[in-house]
Image (cartoon, grey):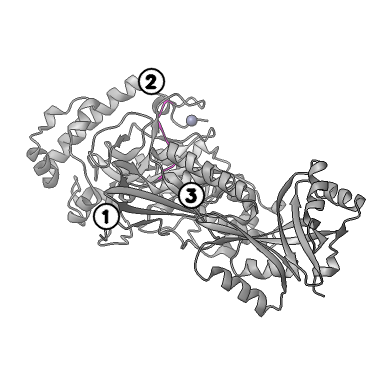
Amino acid sequence: MIIKQLSVFLENRTGRLTELTGILAANDINISAFSIADTADYGILRMIVGRPDAAAEILREAGFAVKITDVVGMNIPHRPGGLHKALQIISDNNVAIDYMYAFASGDGKSTVVIRAESLQQLIDLLREHKMELLQEGDVYQV
Amino acid sequence: MIWNKLYECMEREELLKLQGERVSSMVQRVYDSVPFYRKKLQEKGIEPGDITTIGDLKKLPFTTKQDLRDNYPFGLFTVPHADIVRLHASSGTTGKSTVVGYTHNDIQMWSEVVARSLTMAGVGKSDLIQVAYGYGLFTGGLGLHYGAEKVGATVIPISGGNTKKQLQLMEDFGSTVLACTPSYAAYLGEALVEEKIDRKHIKLKAGIFGAEPWTEEMRSQIEQLLGIKAYDIYGLSEIIGPGVSMECHCQKGMHIFEDHFIPEIINPESGEVLPYGELGELVFTPATKEAMPLIRYRTRDLTRLHADRCECGRTLVRMEKCVGRSDDMLIIRGVNVFPSQVESVLLEMSETKPHYLLVVDRENNLDTLEIRVEIEEQFFSDEVKELEGLRKRIKANISSILGISATIRLVEPGTIERSMGKAQRVIDNRKIK
Ligand SMILES: [Zn+2]
């Protein structure tokens, strides 16, 4: 249930992000989710892509600093209180979250990507509460 | 082992007295025989008789590389041509090359200091030393050669280049010591791996490397590739060639052979002599040279001197690895800043590599300094707080070393231009405005 996320260091330069998305597109790599954590000078781009290992390799060759990080994806129903319920479970059980971001999958569900210090603990907890976890097959390209 | 205990372990007071005598007689010699120096001393109102102790050295004027060029080729020689037995010349990358001459005694003295250097690295009679420094006008090859013969080692005068042959002889002859530039040593080490030569067939135990700047990182790389202990030797042809100073086995700086080459550290701006421990430009007075002694020659190399006694037993001062050239000095908000200081900070931090660029500017009449540092992929964290922590650590370390604060900007890997040797380390926008 662990999903590989690509993290890329990006300087805040005009066109830099476009360059990166261009490279992925040219190599037929699908981006299903992304978020950017930014400061004044640089940002950290986090993405869920179709072929994470290949994408990391291609981006490294293009000179980017890339890191593959393990995350958990959780599907939540697209209705009021859906996200709240999931977060309540996590915080009640004192699982520390480093960061999270969400994307809508289009079939009435949203997916939340979560990075936590202890991923296995998070997975066990979510399973215990019958939350729907994102499977590798849901995002990876074959 | 110490080659010459009398001079290498001489009590400091006695040594200073000896230096005073040597400088005094040298000043008399150049005054009598070199019109350039006679004029220079007269302009300063100095008579040779005014210089009697080592304390008087600071009264004397400096000699620069430009002075050597102006007196090209033989203008600074103090002896008739009949007494010169050898000439060496530096390859001047800009302008004329500089020429140095040696008498028979100079060659003897040079062999002596190189013998002392080799002994520091544990080289003795039973060693085979592969001299892969260039032989020719450059002082490296012949300098090491004569010193090694004096020690009684077996010299393999292969000179530089021809890597295959280097490796073949290293294996067939069983060379125990390698002398060359550190970059060539690293290259040979890599070639050894590529050629799949079994390390068991290589008998190397030590390397004597110098003639170009190198880092501690390079040292461990070379030591690992070649399976040796790597020693740093320092020298410049204007003073003698290799063998001006050398690391002992303690490797806490290079012992300067002060009975021949009298060192000083000066503020490169004011020329004022700085105390031991302070960073400044290294100046040498090679007082015993016969053919071409120089008064207070400015090396433009930046370093510190330490006079506390070394564990090896030698009393000679030690100089740190040079941290850069005085030509590179920047003055930012009135503080002297050397790009190499930034480099040393980054090298000491395990999370960074020394790929950096200093950008100096002026805003509202105040100098600003931005230091761009490349992110290393293995240390790239995908959390902002980690990266910000790294940035703050770099900032704190830099400001404690430079004495001024700088803005640290993390940039993508490979975005700072690098080239072999002369990478551009500074953009000073103040000069353009
Ligand atoms: Zn020592």
For the record, the magenta segment spans B315-323
- Residue B33 vs A82, above or below: the answer is above
In front: label 2 or label 3: 3
- Residue B173 vs B270, above or below: the answer is below
- The residues bearing labels 2 and 3 have C-alpha atoms spaced at a distance of 32 Å
Residue B114 in the image: state x and y as whole percent.
43, 41
Residue under label 2, please give it. B11
**What residue is drawn where x is 64% and y is 52%?**
B381
Residue B189 in the image: state x and y as whole percent.
61, 56
Q: Amino acid at mark 2?
A: Glu
Q: Does B105 sit left or right of B387 as displayed?
A: left
Residue A98 in the image: state x and y as whole percent.
70, 48
Choose between B321 and B209: the one closer to the eye.
Answer: B321
- The residues bearing labels 2 and 1 have C-alpha atoms spaced at a distance of 35 Å
Residue under label 3, please give it. B214
Residue B61 in the image: state x and y as whole percent.
18, 39
Rendering quarter of residue A80:
bottom right
Q: Amino acid at mark 3?
A: Trp
Q: Is mark 3 within 8 Å of ligand 1?
A: no
Rendering quarter of residue B163:
bottom right
Mark 2 lies on a secondary structure that is loop
In front: label 1 or label 3: 3
